[in-house]
Image: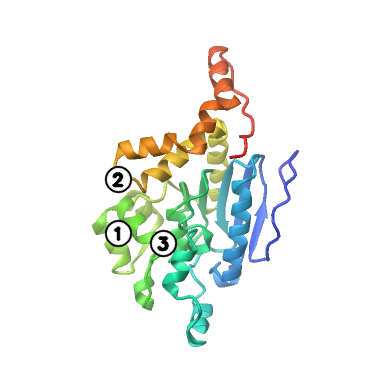
Amino acid sequence: MAQGTSYQSPSHSDEIKVSFPREHILLLTFNRPKSLNAVTPTMTEDVKRVMDWFDNEPSLWVAIVTGEGRAFCAGADLVAWNKLKASGPSKESDQDRIINHPDGFASLSRRYSTSKPIIAAVNGGAYGGGVEVLLNCDLVIASEDAKFALPEVKRGVVAVQGGMPRLSRTAGHQRASEMLLLGRTITAQDAATRFGFVNKVVPKSEVLPTAFAWAAEIMENSPDAVQSTKRALLIATRSGSVEEAVIAHVKTKESDRAFTSENIKEGLRAFTEKRKPSWRNPAKL
């Protein structure tokens, strides 16, 4: 717990860990190390409760997502999925489940509601849904020994939780096809330099410290402006033109708050007074 802060996060199982290592920072850890942090329905429900709470807690400005043990996230728990398939048809088809749960895999891979930055601290292997999760994070710090794969086609399934369009936009059609159609595993260095979805590669011991340092750098900026900017980036992924994205963004609650908050006044005042600004927690949207 960061000194001087006291948070009461929602209840959750031991499949995730929630902590507050620095002021304004939520650290969310996938906590099934013996299963390489493969995601279960319970874990997904836990993450959703915590992230929905995070969205609405004004004093938390940045989330960091990581994994316990030697993996970031191995994707879906295929053993549990196999048991589900073997038990016969369910009331909700796989396609309906995707449509009806718009936050996506682990309640993160398609999450659109969160206008606060999310940093992925990739401590080890990320496979399948684990890659889809980090593709929807804003910044990705990876261990130099981390490996990445979207091997769904090798198991007769498809990376349907946001990974295909995001990777295509980030890496381009041909490089995305290399991961998606071959199911090939790539290194952290390739993920950074060839595929473009990792921001920085560091020694394993430096993954979390680097994520904390980047979070601290974000927090030097106005939280209102940061959240409005992230909302604009999210809108850009769904808009057909620059002009559409600009108009849609200025109509958002985040944009309205940024233009009218105490923080914009503080930022301008600090500039004229040649001092460091002192930011306040944003008002609830």
Nearer to us in this view, 48 or 174: 48
* In the image: residue 142, left or right of residue 208: left
Q: Quadrant of residue 280?
A: top right
Disc number lying in front (1 or 2) = 2
Nearer to us in this view, 277 or 211: 277
Q: Is residue 194 visible?
A: no
In the rendered image, the vertical position of residue 265 relative to residue 95, given as above or below: above
Crowding at label 1, few (<14), some or many (≥20) Cα neighbours within 10 Å? many
* In the image: residue 120, left or right of residue 284: left
Q: Alpha-carbon distance for marks 2 and 3? A: 30 Å
Nearer to us in this view, 167 or 3: 167
Q: Alpha-carbon distance for marks 1 and 2? A: 21 Å
State the SS at label 3.
strand
Q: Which residue is mark 2?
A: 240
User: Residue 49's spot in the image, x, y percent?
Assistant: 62, 58
Q: Residue at x 24, y 58 (%)?
A: 174
Three-letter amino acid code at the position of disc 3: Phe
Q: Which residue is mark 3?
A: 148
Q: Residue at x 63, y 42 (%)?
A: 60
State the SS at label 1.
helix
In the rendered image, the vertical position of residue 244 relative to residue 179, given as above or below: above
Disc number lying in front (3 or 1) = 1
Crowding at label 3, few (<14), some or many (≥20) Cα neighbours within 10 Å? many
Which is nearer the N-term, disc 2 or disc 3? Answer: 3
Which is nearer the N-term, disc 3 or disc 1? Answer: 3
Q: Residue at x 37, y 47 (%)?
A: 237
The numbered disc on residue 176 is 1
